[in-house]
Image (tube, rainbow, N blue to C red):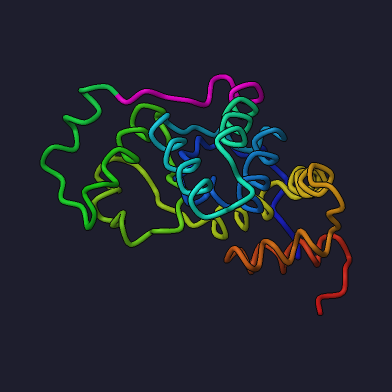
Amino acid sequence: MDPVTTRPVPIQVVLADSNVLYSRALRDYLLCAAEMEVVGVNWSQEILDEVTEHLVVNLPSFTEESAKALTSALADTFPRAIVNPSAADYARLADIALPDGDDRHVIAAALAADAKIVCTGNVRHFPAAVMAQLGIVVMTPDELFTQLIYTHLPQMVAAHRAAVAAFHRATDESTLTALRRAGATKTADLMTAALGLTDN
């Protein structure tokens, strides 16, 4: 692996969809990358509400108090991340057809953030041709993290280590396994190589 590190790459502003923030492994990797200042991250209150609602429903150990703690931690760490789409943002989408109209608020949030990337696990809900009209690229977490590893390897290694340190009893191996389970297989493979680990 020989990542491109000879010239600085402009920070890309990323709008995180709820399915990315829902996953502990993906959320930690994205937020740690943001803390290393290789990307900027944004989300809306509606996206956060979707995240916490699904966590409460799907994880018995995740309570309403857990939801408040998560949103407070996000607000404390990334105070400028939350955006509020305006009527003008929604107006730009009035004539755009989407596979799932419920995702319109995600694009509106991306417009409000002036994000160039929407990071989501549901790329089919955001057709590339439609998004291109708005100047936005849609990427899965695996695609985004892979790009960042190639362009900002030292920072992404540091982000990986921060993600490991943030979770009690986590190891390099358990974190990489969690990434694979979350669909970020190429990311895990590249980071395994970067860390000099044996890929079993």
| In this rendering, position of residue 140 left or right of residue 88 | right
Q: Residue furthest bottom?
A: 200
* Residue name at image x 67 percent, y 55 percent: 150
Q: Quadrant of residue 47?
A: top left
Residue at image coords 77%, 49%: 160
Q: In which quarter of the image is the C terminus?
A: bottom right
Q: How many circles with numbers are drawn on the protein?
A: 0
Q: In this view, does 41 lie above or below 72?
A: below
Q: Position of residue 108 (x, y in %)?
A: 30, 34
Which quadrant would residue 75 be assigned to in this image?
top right
Establish if 178 lies above or below 169: below
The location of residue 80, given as percent across then percent down, is 54, 20
Picture coordinates of residue 168 (x, y %)?
Answer: 84, 47
Q: Reply yes or no: does residue 77 show up in magenta.
A: yes
The stretch of residues the image draws in magenta is 75-85
Residue at the location (54% across, 34% down)? 41
Position of residue 168 relative to residue 179, above or below, is above
Q: In this view, does 180 lie to the left or right of 133?
A: right
Above/below status of 11 relative to 88: below
- Image x and y of residue 90, in percent: 21, 31
- Residue 92 is one of the magenta-drawn residues: no
Task: Out of 128 and 150, give the one closest to the viewer.
Answer: 128
Q: Which of 22 and 172 is in front in this view?
A: 22
In which quadrant is the N terminus drawn?
bottom right
